[in-house]
Amino acid sequence: MTPAGSGETVDTYAHPETLVSTDWVADHASDPTVRVVEVDGDVHLHEAGHIDGAIVLDWHFELQDPVERDFVKRESFEALMSRKGIAETDTVVFYGDKSNCFATYCLWLFKLYGHEDVRIMDGGRVKWEQEGRPWSQKPSIHSPARYAAQDADLSIRAFRDEVFRHMEARRPLIDVRSWAEYWGELTHLPDYPHEGAHRGGHIPGSRSIPWAAAANTHDGTFKSPAELLSIYRDLDIDRRGHEVIAYCRSGERSSHTWYVLTYLLGYPRVKNYDGSWTEWGNLVAAPIEKSEPACDE
């Protein structure tokens, strides 16, 4: 499916094979070629209860470089996957809390390193819980594998210089943070004070479309294709080859939007700016826009 134009509607996802149901996960529990991976914002959730056999990845400590502000290098990624028992030929299904926000970040990183078959369990932990499916407290142990990653695919990752050029050319930029962050009222989220910025606001010309608008509030599943299209229709990104960059605070929430635009709506050139506001809001001479406080009469 190609991206729909401004007057079109869609009734199917562009790449429905990348989104699986809780039934599909339950039915493939014993499939040796499938690895279910949990990635949460709250790292304690997995220990409290997880899908039986699910591998846990800590997005903050295991997937980030311990020295540079970057995710792990290729060799470290290969070593981590090998220890976890994941092979590059496996079908990897991600799920987690917060409407799969951190799960999509992990999927984005896997695609960056060339993993072919990656999927999201629609609804994540909330959907599994609502359906009364069982949780396990047993540690998930898999035999070590030999993982071979590819060179990083930078066609899905944006860096600051590219964002500058994108901004100056007035190409589509999506700020997926909350309205309070977009307008500069908040410089960090309450639970992440160490990931704030000196200045609040947004990148000039960026549109505010909070990432959670793509998810159903009652169970964390993705909205229908038609509903998603209506959210992003006005971005002028329906022309083939028209690139869009999404950003948030540090790349997790924007990966959710990247997944929606790339795999559910089928836009061909979408990048995640994972430096996001913790880089831009601290960057010397980087322009920002923000709301002006109302003047008291």
Image: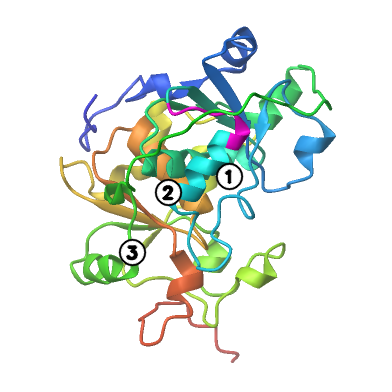
- Residue at x 41%, y 35% (from the top left corner): 148
Contact flag, marks 1 and 3 (Cβ < 8 Å): no
Q: Can residue 161 be seen in the rendering of this structure?
A: yes
Which quadrant of the figure has residue 13? top left
Crowding at mark 2 (Cα within 10 Å: few <14, some 14-19, many 20+): some
- Residue at x 75%, y 25% (from the top left corner): 129
In this view, the residue in front, 142 or 26, is 142
Q: Position of residue 110 (x, y in %)?
A: 44, 39
Crowding at mark 1 (Cα within 10 Å: few <14, some 14-19, many 20+): many
Crowding at mark 3 (Cα within 10 Å: few <14, some 14-19, many 20+): some
Predominant secondary structure, magenta span:
loop
Q: Can residue 213 be seen in the rendering of this structure?
A: no
Contact flag, marks 2 and 3 (Cβ < 8 Å): no
Residue for badge 3: 159
In this view, the residue in front, 68 or 212, is 68
Q: Position of residue 288 (x, y in %)?
A: 39, 78
Range covered by the magenta-colored residues: 83-88
- Residue at x 35%, y 20% (from the top left corner): 11
Q: At label 2, which amino acid type do we have?
A: Arg
Tag 3 or tag 1, which sits nearer the N-term? 1
Q: At label 1, which amino acid type do we have?
A: Phe
The secondary element bearing badge 3 is classed as loop
Tell me the quadrant of the picture where the N terminus can be found. top left
Residue for badge 2: 74
Tag 3 or tag 2, which sits nearer the N-term? 2
Q: Is 173 placed above or below 261 here?
A: below
Which residue ends up furthest to the left in the rendered image?
A: 240
Q: Position of residue 126 (x, y in %)?
A: 70, 30
Q: Position of residue 189 (x, y in %)?
A: 65, 64
